[in-house]
Image (spheres, rainbow, N blue to C red):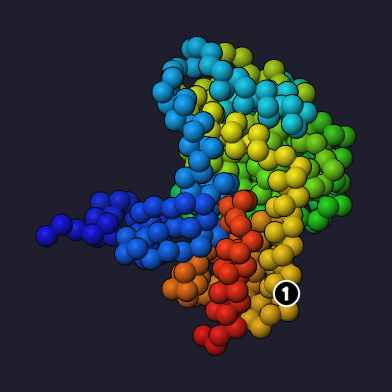
Amino acid sequence: MSMTITEKDKKYVASTYARFPVEIVSGKGSVATDSSGKEYIDLGSGIGVTAFGYSDDLWIKAVTDQLGKVQHTSNLYYTDPCASLAEFLCERTSMEKVFFSNSGAEANETAIKAARRYGAEKKGEDHFTVVTMEKSFHGRTLTTLAATGQEAFHRLFRPLTPGFVSVAPGDAENLLKVCREEKACAVMLEVIQGEGGVNVLDKDYVRTVSDICQKEDLILIIDEIQTGNGRTGQLYGYMNYGIKPDIFTTAKGIGGGLPLGATVLGEKVKDIFSPGDNGSTFGGNPVCCAGALNILSRMDEQFLSEVRRKGDLVKDMLSGKSGVLSVSGMGLMIGIETVRPAAEAARECIKEGVLLLTAKEKLRLLPALNIPDEQLIWAVEKIIKVLGQEA
Ligand SMILES: Cc1ncc(COP(=O)(O)O)c(C=O)c1O
């Protein structure tokens, strides 16, 4: 007898994920269908990846058109999707140059390399420390784990890459002190900590950090892997804060479902890399870039204002409801502090036909940015019902 998808996965796939008992076989927009034919409204979008939902027609066309031309060539040659996507990113953000890779962790690795090189050239090779925030999340490689300010991720994988210190967000004086003591080259942060619990960093604090970086000639790296690409109702999350980073990194939603990472470099570091300093076989893949260009070029101001409106709608629906302690986030990046344990509530929501995420002790919603109101409202009503029930 042949094995089910779940049985096969449990037998052959490394057990790094605590999967929910759902076998996804197809999807359209914000509706996912499992192997039994049951439909779900998906409020997780592959952890903030499928910005326009499953199997979006325009994205499919952009990707398949490119597949029929060139699916891959090495980075020894030029391709239009890669160059055009870089142009788009720079023009929409007033940044200067882009390095493409395949994932968020790699985008952050590149940002750290750029910052260290800047520190070494400007101040000396002992200026290599990157100051990050407690409760941050920057990836799973040994270097981005070191950058991640959560001890739980470090255990059992030591030694991690040296040269990272995390500070509690909110205390700018301490940050300045640590940067000086540690001979830092950079500060790295997420304006809304996603995995850490949808913690929105204070605007004054982030602006003060940006000022400190300018005065002290430190590279300000903003990790926009989860907050980027329209998620918060601005093209990039830092745009809600009135600051301009020296580097921002992104991945997830930019590719619409195909793997793509980007490290976007500002004036100070635009020419920090020379040929041979960094590289990636698949980085800037023409199919991924063609899809990304299609996704990003549809995120105009009208689209972004809809993301903000939908986020406010969800917050209004949830606030004051029984079982809801607080709601955090911006745009369609929403955390719900619950009376019931979040993981248990998430499992109940799945039974009700709603896929969602957790982040620490909260429920986390990252729906597709184009989710229709009816589907969003239906799903949030189910969440309210589940949270109002006794455990
Ligand atoms: C803020 C942030 N940075 C980095 C990463 C790592 O991205 P990836 O899993 O694509 O390597 C994530 C993934 O969840 C993230 O949320």
Compared with 351, 219 (above or below) is above
Q: How many marks?
A: 1
**In the image, what residue occupies the spot 51% across and 85% down?**
391
- Above or below for 95 versus 336: above
Provide residue 201's location: percent of width, then percent of height. Answer: 76, 55
- The residue that appears at 68% across and 45% down in the rendered structure is 230
Q: Position of residue 235 (x, y in %)?
A: 71, 41
Give whichever of 84, 303 is nearer the camera: 303
The residue drawn where x is 71% and y is 27% is 90
> Would you say the beta carbon of the disc 1 residue lies within 8 angstroms of ligand 1?
no
Q: Position of residue 80 (x, y in %)?
A: 56, 18
> Which residue shows up at 75% across the image and 32% down it?
93
Residue type, label 1: Ser
Q: Residue furthest left?
A: 1
The quarter in which the N terminus is drawn is bottom left
Viewer can see residue 28? yes
- For residue 385, above or below residue 205: below
Q: Nearer the viewer, residue 388 or 30?
A: 30
Q: Is any part of residue 260 visible from this angle?
A: no
Which residue has dot 1 on it? 319
Instruction: Give 99 or 299, whichever is nearer the viewer.
Output: 299
Instruction: Label 1, secondary structure: give it.
Output: loop
The answer to which of 200 and 181 lies nearer the viewer is 200
Q: Single out the residue that lies furthest toward the bottom.
A: 390
Q: Is residue 313 left or right of residue 155?
A: right
Task: Answer few, some or many: residues within 10 Å of disc 1's Cα (few below 14, many 20 plus, some between 14 and 19).
Answer: some
The spot of residue 224 in percent (x, y) is 66, 43
Q: Is residue 31 left or right of residue 180?
A: left
